[in-house]
Image (cartoon, rainbow, N blue to C red):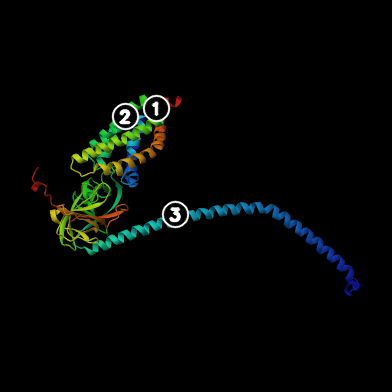
Amino acid sequence: MALALGGYFSSASNVFTVSLVNLQAWFSARYLAVQDFLTAPRDIASLRQRNAELEGEVAELQAQVIQLQQQVGETEILAALLDFSRARPENKYLAAAVIGRDPSPFLHYVIINRGSNDGILRGMPVVTDQGLLGRVDAVIADASRVQLITDPGSSVNIRLQNAETEASLVGSVTGDLMLELIPQDINVQPGDLVLTSGLGGGYPPDLIVGQIVNVRSRDFDLFQQATVQPVVDFNRLEVVLVIVNFKPVDISPLVPAP
Amino acid sequence: MRNLIAIPVILLTVILQTAIVSRLYLLAGVADLPLVMVAAWALQDEVESAWHWAAATGLLVGFISGLPWIVPVFGYIAVVALAQILQRRVWQAPLLAMFSVTFLGTIIVSLLSLVVLRFLDVPLPVSDVLGLLTLPSVLLNMLLAIPVYVVMRDIARWVYPSLEVE
């Protein structure tokens, strides 16, 4: 003990401790290698499970994003419709969703999810925040069929804002809008705004319909014709407004029989 | 009893037509899913209820559509008549019969619609109707013909189990 404390065995003890430490390191390294080998598969399995959970969460969040984007779109549409109704306080509106189209391609009708239970009556005008859409053609308890102004059987009395003249707007099988019965002496220009005239009592006056795109005027014709670009996008109808306080006038008894 | 499958099938077909198919335009034409469904059903062997299916589908479409009800009712009944005539002629090639019935049936319903609407004073130029509406509708109906035929064949095998032996 005295020799050891005196440092006489230091070289021998160094050799011993180095060997011991090396042996310890060798065992430790082998142990860790075996431990890695035994625990690694379990980690991969847990990682895979965690990955699957995260992928599930991502898919769920993506679905939520799509749902929220859809809600934002609907909110924007409803806000625009609200602005439109506030700008015309004289009318009472009822919002309705477009749930379908007429099965026949010959006719341009849409089906909305409001009916007689909501106070809808035949002949009520239907608009969007952009302008005139059409009018209610048939009603059942919880749904209605709306004839669009692009329907071949539709005819709307209109006035041209700039020319201060009246004419008749008719639809077609292709969905194009044609303006007929424009007197020859009226100067009609592309870009002129087309509004409902209220004549005939079918629609309230001053609803925006569209803009004139081109004019066809021939000397041998009695009237001019014009093509109208509607303000409403008829291919993307989601929510519409029915003017419920407008009572259409039925002038059919006044029309002479042929 | 299994013939009652007609009720959900017809309802689903008309709902799909008004909610989705009618929004998918090609020029001015759209596919007529109820017509293709009636044609496919009428071409199945042993099916005897095709007339009832045609009348029920026509009445439902006539109720929803702005067209006079006689157009879809008589149009779909004409499709069944056409299918039964062609089935006897080309019974060994059901897909050829399906394409033929779809092609001719679409033209018959289209012409019937044109005649009735013109009779009601709806201004419809014949050239526009044929070029922009009827021909695109024929093409779209032909695209639907095979998948609808397959679905209706499966339904027919379920309603008439004896067909599975063949």
Chain under numbered label 2: B
Residue drawn at x 24%, y 52% as measured from the top left: A177
| Discs 3, 1 touching: Cβ within 8 Å | no
Q: In this figure, which residue is indicated by the disc labeled 3?
A: A63
Amino acid type at circle 1 is Tyr
Tell me, yes or no, whether dots 1 and 2 are on the same chain.
Answer: yes
Pick whichever, B17 or A154, lies toward us. A154
Residue A191 image point, x, y percent: 24, 61
Amino acid type at circle 3 is Ala
Residue A53 image point, x, y percent: 53, 53
Tell me, yes or no, whether dots 3 and 1 are on the same chain.
Answer: no
Q: Quadrant of the N terminus of chain A?
A: bottom right
Query: Residues under labels 2 and 3: Cα distance?
Result: 47 Å
Q: Is residue B158 visible?
A: no
Q: In this figure, which residue is indicated by the disc labeled 2?
A: B82
Compared across the picture, whether B147 is left or right of B109 comes to: right
**SS at mark 1 in the image:** loop
Q: Nearer the viewer, mark 2 or mark 3?
A: 2
**SS at mark 2 in the image:** helix
Chain under numbered label 3: A
Q: In this figure, which residue is indicated by the disc labeled 1?
A: B160
**SS at mark 3 in the image:** helix
Q: Residues within 10 Å of mark 1 (few under 14, many from 20)?
A: some
